[in-house]
Structure formats: structure tokens, C-alpha cells
Image (cartoon, rainbow, N blue to C red):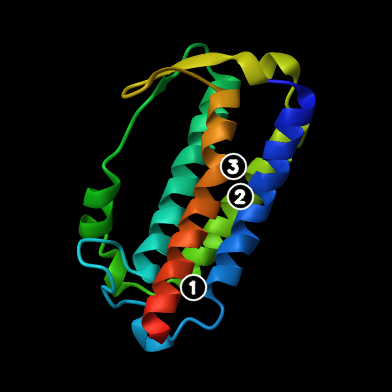
Amino acid sequence: MTRAERQSLIEKYRAGYDEVVRSLEGFPPAALTARLRPGKWTAVEIVHHLSDSENISAQRLRKLIAEEHPLIWSYDEANLAVKLKYNERDMAPALDSFRTARATTAQLLDLMSEEDWTRSGFHTESGPYTAEHWLEIYAAHAHGHAEQIRRLRELARG
């Protein structure tokens, strides 16, 4: 990955929180916890997922930077949604947590050396895992979920 490609992904990563906030604008409050698509997450569940995922991903990046050949554990996001009662909790603290985790991680992204970007760990589901691979995943993650929220918002508006 070139420096320019990496920088573009970092900017996309930085913009993820604002994209999610924009996707929630005008969302009918009563519909935030409604299951508007059978078998799919609600808007509130998506926000809680983003918070938990962002905090887990922040730790993953830190392990890649600071540890020699770290083991990066996968997790069951659907199970977290149920066990952590995503749809029963206020999403405001989750949004704050998502914002903060992203902001502190973005600071690290700006300070990483070329060596940091290529340090390798092992992901329990996908195998060899570098910080560049991490960035490719998480630069797009919030944007994908923001689009999901926008689709739900349109369904909620009828």
C-alpha cells in the first residue's frame, strides 16, 4: 500500500463517526429500536455494535503496534448484540464511546512508522493480519453501517 493510499484510508476512517451521525439525522425516535427489516439489526443495535467494534478494533491495532506477533481474537458480534442487550440501552453513551475510540486511534494512525504499518499478527479467523489490513477493514466499517442506518431511516419514514 502506498502512503497516498494509506492516507486516503485514514481520512475515510476519520470521517466515519460523522457519517454515522449524519445517517441518524431525521431518524424517527420511536423507530430507532424497531426491527424494520426482519432478522436485521435496529438502528440502536448498529450504534452499539459500532461502539463495541471500535473499542475492540482499537485494542487490535494497539496489539499490532506494541506486541510481537500478537494473536488477534475474533468475536461473535450477533451474540454480543443479544447478550449485551443492545436494543434495550440508550445509544448516546455508545455514540460517545465510538467517537472517542476513533479519535484516540486516529492520533495513533498519524504517528505510525512504516515499520508499524507492516508489523504482523495472526487473526483467529482470517490468518495473517497487519495494521494495513486493519485500516482497510475499519476505514470502511462505519460507512457501511451508516448506509445501513440510512436505509432503515427511509423504511421508518415510510
Q: Which residue is mark 3?
A: 139
Total marks in image: 3
Q: Which mark is residue 102?
A: 2
Q: Amino acid at mark 2?
A: Arg
Q: Position of residue 71 (x, y in %)?
A: 39, 19
Q: Position of residue 69 (x, y in %)?
A: 48, 12
Dot 3 crowding, Cα within 10 Å, few <14, some 14–19, many 20+: many
**Disc with the residue nearer the chain's start (1 vs 2):** 1
Q: Nearer the viewer, residue 129 or 63?
A: 129
- Disc 1 element: helix
Quarter the C terminus occupies:
bottom left
Q: Which residue is mark 1?
A: 92
Left or right of 1 on screen, residue 110: right
The residue at 64%/45% (across/down) is: 13
Q: Nearer the viewer, residue 140 or 119?
A: 140
Do the residues bearing badges 1 and 3 touch, measured as CB atoms within 8 Å? no
Do the residues bearing badges 1 and 2 touch, measured as CB atoms within 8 Å? no
Left or right of 119 on screen, residue 69: left
Q: Position of residue 40 (x, y in %)?
A: 27, 61
What's the CA distance linking mark 1 and mark 2? 15 Å
What's the CA distance linking mark 1 and mark 3? 22 Å
Left or right of 114 on screen, residue 149: left
- Disc 2 element: helix
**Disc with the residue nearer the chain's start (1 vs 3):** 1
The residue at 57%/33% (across/down) is: 136
Q: Which mark is residue 44?
A: none
Q: Amino acid at mark 1?
A: Ala
Residue 123 placement: quadrant: top left
